[in-house]
Image (cartoon, helix red, strand yellow):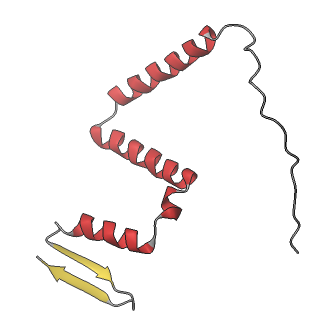
Amino acid sequence: MDIERRVPWREVEPLPDLNGTIEPLLKTVSILRDAWEDALCGASPEDVLAVRERRLRHHAIETGIIERLSVTTIRRLHQLITRHQPAYEARDNLGGIVKTCG
């Protein structure tokens, strides 16, 4: 059963003035940034790379970037990524294993 839900239109209103100054909020951000930089300094390059890759993957999923990639685009990206590999093993469209050597 399809139920259509209508939301009445409301004019966009400006944001209310801040209750106080923004300085305490900015200090909080600075403290978090400093803590993040300290954590990065103590991490290995591999750990930093892994964290960044997870963050980018999470962002891509949340924003729908991955879902918008067509099959053709994904295949083309795979070709570009693997073309410099001397050998690889993959499955074709029928499920068969394909092996190549440089």
Q: Quadrant of the N terminus?
A: bottom right
Question: Looking at the picture, does residue 20 appear above or below residue 2?
Answer: above
Q: Quadrant of residue 76?
A: bottom left
Question: Horizontal and vertical percent for residue 95?
Answer: 39, 89
The residue sitting at 27% across, 71% down in the picture is 79
Question: Horizontal and vertical percent for residue 78?
Answer: 31, 69
Residue projecting furthest to the left = 102
The residue sitting at 78% across, 28% down in the picture is 13
Name the one closer to the observer, 77 or 89: 77
The residue sitting at 44% across, 26% down in the picture is 36
Horizontal relation, residue 85 to residue 41: left or right: left
Question: Looking at the picture, does residue 39 appear above or below residue 6?
Answer: above
The residue sitting at 56% across, 15% down in the picture is 26
Q: Tag count in the figure? A: 0
Question: Looking at the picture, does residue 59 appear above or below residue 101?
Answer: above
Question: Horizontal and vertical percent for residue 48?
Answer: 35, 39
Q: Quadrant of residue 34?
A: top left
